[in-house]
Image: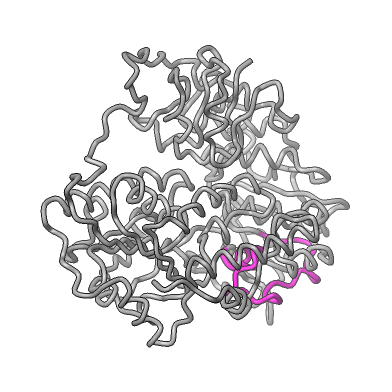
Amino acid sequence: MTYAITQTCCNDATCVAVCPVNCIRPTPQERDFGRTEMLHIDPATCIDCGACADACPVDAIFPVDSLSPAQAGYAAVNAAYFADKAPLEAAPGPNFHPWGAPTFERSLPSDFAPIRVAVVGTGPAGMYAAEDLLLHTNAEVTLVDRLPVAGGLVRYGVAPDHPATKKVGDTFARFHTHPRVRVRLGVEVGKDVTAEELAAHHDAVVYAVGASADRRLGIPGEELPGSVSATAFVSWYNAHPEAAPDAIDLTGAERVVVVGNGNVALDVARILVMDPEALAGTDIADHALAALRGSRVREVVLLGRRGPEDAAYTASELRALTHLPGVRLVVDDHDPRTGAAIDAATGGGAGVDGGVPGDGKAALLRDVARETVDWSRPPAAGRRIVLRFHSAPVAMDGDSAVRAVRVTEGPGEREIPAGLALRAVGYRGLPVPGLPFDEATGTVPHERGRVAGMPGTYVVGWIKRGPSGGIGANRTCAAETIGTLLADAVAGALPVPSRTSQAFRRLVRRRGAQVVDARGLAAIDRAERSQGHASGRPRVKLTTVAALLATAGGSRPRRPD
């Protein structure tokens, strides 16, 4: 028996590090690492030890003979990746590490005085950076977040029907109570404290603030009511405290058009048409579950500017759509290029798209029904998702609200009636007050994570590299940034802080910030899990800043720090 890596792979390579026979690839030293959608286990080399499954932070690894029908195809996906791969050399000795020698020194000299580092942002990028510091140095870490609860995109970006992916949050949460960590949540840089003040209390500051804005389409009608960013929709169903419960109205739309075909587009399409009762046992926001139960949506149309072979979604997320109970997946056959690309995807082998045979994502659509949809008619009975390739939005039409999306069709245009349009064309970083900002890329200029012209200031994650890569990509990104920081520390290039970490907490409290510490964060976690347990759910999220602060405040008395 062998193991297989499945849909929820986060690609952070924890499994690679523990495999005793180097059967998981690509490794971080291979060129394909970071380019594949997921990692793969070689069935010819796997010795069935289960070390990878035990180490996986997102429960993505299972014995092949225990895969569910929906996941069974991943046995072939894993095997296909190795069809044209030479095996790695055997381990030369007991100290061999499959990643090879590190590319930078990941620790400080033993006699080096502890450095104080603030990490701004508690999503995956920030927590991988904090983990690196805590495991490889004696640094003291201050975790800062503008929201009064930790988690970032793990809490507010991962779809509620992907609970295994959310488990990486439990891995990060163990550091919240680390003896060298101070938690300062509900503190916003640029509002409660300046970047200069934050730097004055720490040897270094690492910004992991992500990319929270959405990209615009730049078409007429985009500002009409009923035109909503996928960012806002995801925040709404994930109980983000800045998303109003009534922000989304699903009572008037039978058809929804989603502009984009990345993983976020597939997430929102899936949530809109799946059986609400399948979400009832998740941590979805109560107001979103109620809205979905009363929804009239029967059809979601996903628009892709290019063909199926160039789709932005991952193969694993598309596979999941083909197994969605009660939902038909259809390809709109309006453009002959779409069918031609699918029909031509018949070859073998494996590429860097995740081990999918032939032409990758197009090949996965060979068994999906193709129809030339008559958009003048209302959606057919039942629920379905329509993939429409080679079709770009031209305008959103309507007087007081969106009633249709006008799209390209061959040399002309076609109107697709819709009561709701969701824009899922990517995220964009926002400027951090006090830091330089590149408007063209939506990132902070840097050199290997070091912010240009600001000694002791660093970036990691999407604000560093742009909105690309999943959870696991942040691990190698953080390794580079922390490597740069540690090299600067050894070289004496870090500014000496003029104030203490205790003074920082007093400063933000004087500014009126209601700071949530580790005890308050634990109180929020207990309350949400307790409410969830009562209703058979993993947790019921508190949906407002006021509720989060009130629950955190109930954890008094606090330890003096």
Q: How many marks?
A: 0
Q: In the rendered view, tell whether residue 536 sits above or below residue 97.
A: below
**Residue at the spot 42% in from the left edge and 30% down from the top edge:** 17
Horizontal placement of 60 versus 177: left or right? right
Horizontal placement of 104 versus 344: left or right? left
In the image, the segment drawn in magenta is 231-257
As for residue 253 lying within the magenta part, the answer is: yes
As for residue 102 lying within the magenta part, the answer is: no
Q: Nearer the viewer, residue 149 or 500?
A: 500
User: Is any atom of residue 405 visible in this view?
Assistant: no
Q: In the rendered view, tell whether residue 558 sits above or below residue 259.
A: below
Q: In the rendered view, tell whether residue 547 sits above or below residue 445.
A: below
Q: Quadrant of the N terminus?
A: top right
Q: Nearer the viewer, residue 5 or 379?
A: 5
Tell me the quarter of the picture where residue 331 sits: top right
Instruction: Tell me residue 401's x, y (percent).
Output: 69, 77
Tell me the quarter of the picture where residue 94 sits: top left
Q: Nearer the viewer, residue 136 or 304?
A: 136
Q: In the rendered view, tell whether residue 110 sits above or below residue 139.
A: above
Instruction: Tell me residue 323's x, y (percent).
Output: 75, 38
Instruction: Tell me residue 272's x, y (percent).
Output: 73, 57
* Furthest residue in direction right, as rendered: 381
Tell me the quarter of the picture where residue 561 sits: bottom left
**Residue at the spot 63% in from the left edge and 23% down from the top edge:** 75
**Residue at the spot 46% in from the left edge and 71% down from the top edge:** 559
User: Is any atom of residue 341 visible in this view?
Assistant: yes
Horizontal placement of 435 versus 538: left or right? left
Q: Main secondary structure of the magenta part?
A: loop
Q: Nearer the viewer, residue 267 or 157?
A: 157
Instruction: Give the image's coloring scheme.
Output: one colour
Instruction: Tell me residue 299's x, y (percent).
Output: 77, 55
